[in-house]
Amino acid sequence: MRVRYCKRCGTQFQSDKPDTCLCPVCRKKAKQDSVVRARNCRQCGKAFPGGPRAWYCPECRDIRRRESAARRAKTGTIRPIGSIDVCEICGGEYIVNSARQRYCKNCAAEAVRQTVNPKKAVYAKENKARLKDQQKERRTDRNVCVVCGAVFHASTATVTCSDSCATELRKLRQRESDYRAGRRKRLPADYPVSSTRPQSGVTGVTWCRGKWQAKFKRKYIGMFSTVYEAAEAIRNYEEANEDER
């Protein structure tokens, strides 16, 4: 986890994603802004805000909805909700949950990818230069120095903005190490937090290389995806080795 500087609102946040430049709030809003754009209605030609699959403006959409409801009232529902139908890909049966459902649960995700991925490839090819410039701009001036708090740009994995801050960080971590080892009685009241790694809150569980490392009295147990799994492994090890307590 590293401290980042949001390119939109200027707040500081922590993230382990190397390419992120927006805080969670701004990232959510940016995703909405990139999806909802000005579209032209295929029926009346009017401009309206909508997503990639929005073909009609709200007025025309409401008219088409009423016409569809009238057809259903006249001819009846072709596929009642809850009925059984056959998947177009694998031929297996599935329960109908919506009027436009065409695939079973196992095939739906792959069918959507086969439809969306070619459109993504075309968009990336047509906007290659613009997307490259956006990526370059996102990667500049987004890191925050853990010592002085300055915003800086770095092409390598570093948490300090200069050599002097790197030296100060080593001193701070050495003081923290001495304190934990008992060589220092206490730390100053205004002592900064030098580590940006996530904390588990469980004795013996530490963050290491993207996973949670479990140890019992310096005995390595393993690497786990969650804190719960690492803590459970330590408990199991303790039960199996009660004489080491």
Image: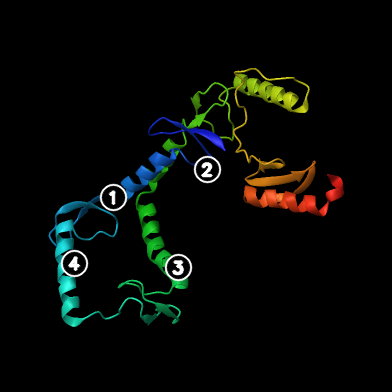
Are discs 2 and 3 less than 8 Å apart at CB?
A: no
Q: Residues within 10 Å of mark 4 (few under 14, many from 20)?
A: few
Are discs 1 and 4 less than 8 Å apart at CB?
A: no
Q: What residue is shown with label 4?
A: 65
Q: Residue at x 83, y 51 (%)?
A: 241
Q: What residue is shown with label 1?
A: 36
Q: CA distance from mark 1 to mark 3?
A: 24 Å
Image depth: mark 1 or mark 4 in front? 4
Residue kind at label 3, given as amino acid type: Glu
Q: CA distance from mark 1 to mark 4?
A: 21 Å
Relative vertical location of residue 162 with respect to residue 223 in this rendering, above or below: above
Whether residue 168 can be seen here: yes
Mark 1 or 4, nearer chain start: 1
Whether residue 134 can be seen here: no
- Left or right of 124: which side holds 210? right
Image depth: mark 4 or mark 2 in front? 4
Picture coordinates of residue 223, whole percent (x, y)? 69, 50
Residue kind at label 4, given as amino acid type: Arg
Q: Nearer the viewer, residue 126 or 151?
A: 151
Are discs 4 and 2 less than 8 Å apart at CB?
A: no
Picture coordinates of residue 109, whole percent (x, y)? 44, 66
Residue kind at label 1, given as amino acid type: Val
Secondary structure under tag 1 reads loop
Q: What residue is shown with label 2?
A: 17
- Left or right of 149: which side holds 197? right
Secondary structure under tag 3 reads helix
Secondary structure under tag 2 reads loop
